[in-house]
Amino acid sequence: MNESLMPFIWVALTLPILLLMQRWIHTHLHGIALLLMGKPDRAVILYAIILFPGVVLHELSHWLTATLLGVRTGSFSLLPRRQADGSVQLGYVEYYKSSSLGAFRESLIGGAPLVTGTAVILLIGFRIFGVTNLSTAIQSGDVDTLVTALSQVFGVPDFLVWLYLLFAVSNAMMPSRSDRRAWPALILTLAIIAVVMVVLDIEAVIFAGVANWAPTVFGYLGSALSMAIAVDVLFMIVLSLIEGLLSRIKGVNVVYGNAEVPPGTSL
């Protein structure tokens, strides 16, 4: 298999896994908040507080990208609120959709949290936790080297704080349904452009340029998604234990339904 394709394959594998894990986390995090607070409105507040750093980064990404692209913004909120359909909105940024906005700029605004979230995860992972050394130790297969690398990770000052920030950012960086609104139009436009380039026989030049940087970009994205999955696995175990303990203490269980649908979270 061509090694240049591996970053794309890795992202294609890790992205749906992370989305499923985040769906579970949002669902059970809200359930734990309900067990602790007893009332739905109070549970929403606690649920939003836990993810607050990620929500701040998410909404600031929208606002900053819109501002840089020259799109006029309106109101900005980081306060959770219930929608008419029963879903929970953790925050929002309003921007004006004029006729000149276009699918490209709107897609950039909508996808900005994924870009900034990926950057923050990579910075914390590589600069704070030194995951490069851990990865090298795992590949070496030497137990002593692996133990040393793990001790360095767990010995990072304020380890729990950085781990929590990774969790909050990872579970708030995905574009919501409204963020993805312009993506179909953008994909259609790019598809038409690709067809035109093929017809005009100029696709080789364009694709050669893309091939130089695309594997690198997807490689970094795959690394960030992998780190997010590793963090989420740890927190899923912790959340399961907390929920089980609270259910025993309270004598009640949270019923999520057959599909385990999260509480309609949007950012």
Image: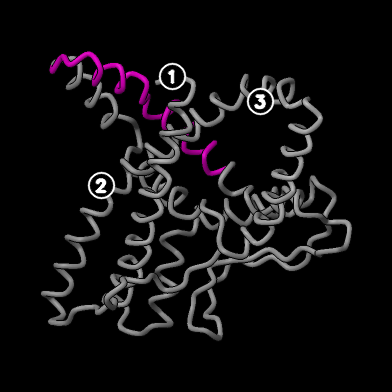
Q: State which quarter of the image contains the N terminus.
A: top left
Quickly name the residue at label 2.
234
Q: Is residue 130 magenta?
A: yes
How many discs appear?
A: 3
On residue 265, which mark appears?
Answer: none
Image quarter of residue 204 = top right
Crowd band around label 3 with a 10 angstrom C-alpha radius: few (<14), some (14–19), many (20+): few
**N-term mark: 3 or 1:** 1
Give the residue at x 19% y 79%: 253
Q: Position of residue 21 (x, y in %)?
A: 34, 54
What is the residue that sits farthest to the front in this orientation? 199
Which element carries disc 1, helix, strand or loop?
helix
On residue 210, which mark appears?
Answer: 3
Q: Gap in Å between the C-alphas at discs 2 and 1?
A: 30 Å
Disc 3 residue type? Val
Which element carries disc 2, helix, strand or loop?
helix
Q: Position of residue 121 (x, y in %)?
A: 47, 38
Q: Position of residue 207 (x, y in %)?
A: 68, 25
The boundaries of the magenta stretch are 116-143
Q: Gap in Å between the C-alphas at discs 2 and 3?
A: 36 Å
Disc 1 residue type? Glu
Give the residue at x 48% y 28%: 219
Q: Is residue 265 magenta?
A: no
Taken as a whole, is the magenta stretch helix, strand or loop? helix
Q: Position of residue 149 (x, y in %)?
A: 25, 21
Q: Gap in Å between the C-alphas at discs 3 and 1?
A: 16 Å
Quickly name the residue at label 1.
3
Which element carries disc 3, helix, strand or loop?
helix
Q: State which quarter of the image contains the C terminus.
A: bottom right
Above-or-below relation of 246 to 86: above
